[in-house]
Amino acid sequence: MTHILGLAAHAAGAELLPFRYDAGLLLAQEVEIRISHCAVCHSDLHLIANDWGISEYPFIPGHEIIGKVTAVGSDVRSLSIGQRVGVGWQSNSCGLCEWCTQGMENLCPSAEATCVRRHGGFAEAVRVNARFAIPIPDALSSEHTAPLLCGGITVYNPLRQHGINPTSRVGIVGIGGLGHMALQFARVFGAEVTAFSTSAAKEEEARALGAHHFVNTREPRAMRELVGTFDFIMTTVNADLDWMSFIHALRPTGTLCLVGVPPSPLAIHAFPLISGVRSISGTPIGSPHRLREMMDVAARHGIKAQIESFPMSHVNEAIDKVRNNKVRYRAVLAN
């Protein structure tokens, strides 16, 4: 289709309204995807509000997309019409830089985001470079899989990068949109998994998702008893924490990994890092190869997001519920 109908923000913080744009000619390396589902990510809320100063209006948000290929460019050989695919945060890269040629396209300095300075997935269709359209295994349902395309890979990639395995002792901080998927993946990798939360009421759910242990971080004594326990701690919350308590909870050579974005700079004492060869890290999404791998793992082990579904036309209702933390744990829009 040349003209695509979606739901666009026309100004910072504005509600989304119907908007039709001319997609132009399909490029040789592109595919067009008829969207069946698109999840609402917190990054979409930041883009709508222009919190990061990179939004250009009007634009259609949405970057956790699943649908079927309806057209392929002349150079595309990897996908076929009718195939079910998913698209995450990234829609293109240069393909030539040192990062792309190493299979780390998510680090490409020329990376193109799916809904930054272009139109995304709160729409009837989207176009992306075919390399970034990921085949979806038949075993996975579209609505429960859409949040894996950004939220899922955000937690999966660091677990793989840091070699999490059955010898690992892993902590996951926060049982929300990211954390509930991180618990599932960490358990599948065979790690001994501990969930950290400020809500004691989430213990039963955390254990059902894969946690062997549960820690209420509002109890200082509980944190003191964990000194020197973990090989890897992933924090998924967008909040300021008592960072030194988590540094002290690491074993020698352990890593504290941030995938949530705290509002304030981290205040860390250097000595525990030096004396124990501990480190602090972060990671953005993952490469197309890693996305394909994650989908295979999810299909074989039954990993899925917990969702609340909304018709695409109810996008503003879904956004309000996500903004007010009233969705457990991911909102998914359906066409």
Image (cartoon, rainbow, N blue to C red):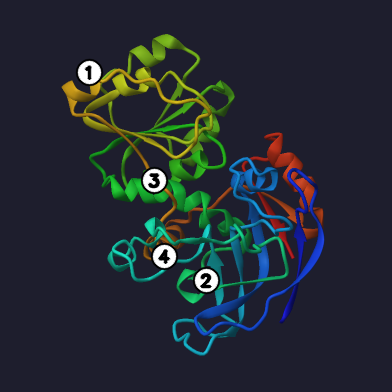
* C-beta proximity under 8 Å, tags 3 and 1: no
Circle on res. 138: 2
Q: Residue 247's x, y, as percent?
A: 32, 23
Q: Which of the two residues, 327 or 154, is positioned nearer the viewer here?
A: 154
Work out whether 13 lies above or below 148: above
Q: Amino acid at mark 4?
A: Pro
Disc 1 or 4, which lies upstream in sequence? 1
Position of the C terminus by quadrant? bottom right
Position of the N terminus by quadrant? bottom right
Q: Secondary structure at mark 1?
A: helix
- Which residue position is annotated with label 1? 271
Q: Amino acid at mark 3?
A: Thr
Q: Which of the two residues, 272 or 113, is positioned nearer the viewer here?
A: 113
| Left or right side of 91 for 61 | right
Report, in whole angstroms, how far the alpha carbon at label 1 lies from the one at label 2: 50 Å
Q: Residue 146's x, y, as percent?
A: 58, 58
Q: Residue 80's x, y, as percent?
A: 53, 85
Label 3 CA crowd tier, 10 Å (few <14, some 14–19, many 20+): some
Disc 3 or 4, which lies upstream in sequence? 3
- Which residue position is annotated with label 3? 283
Disc 1 or 2, which lies upstream in sequence? 2
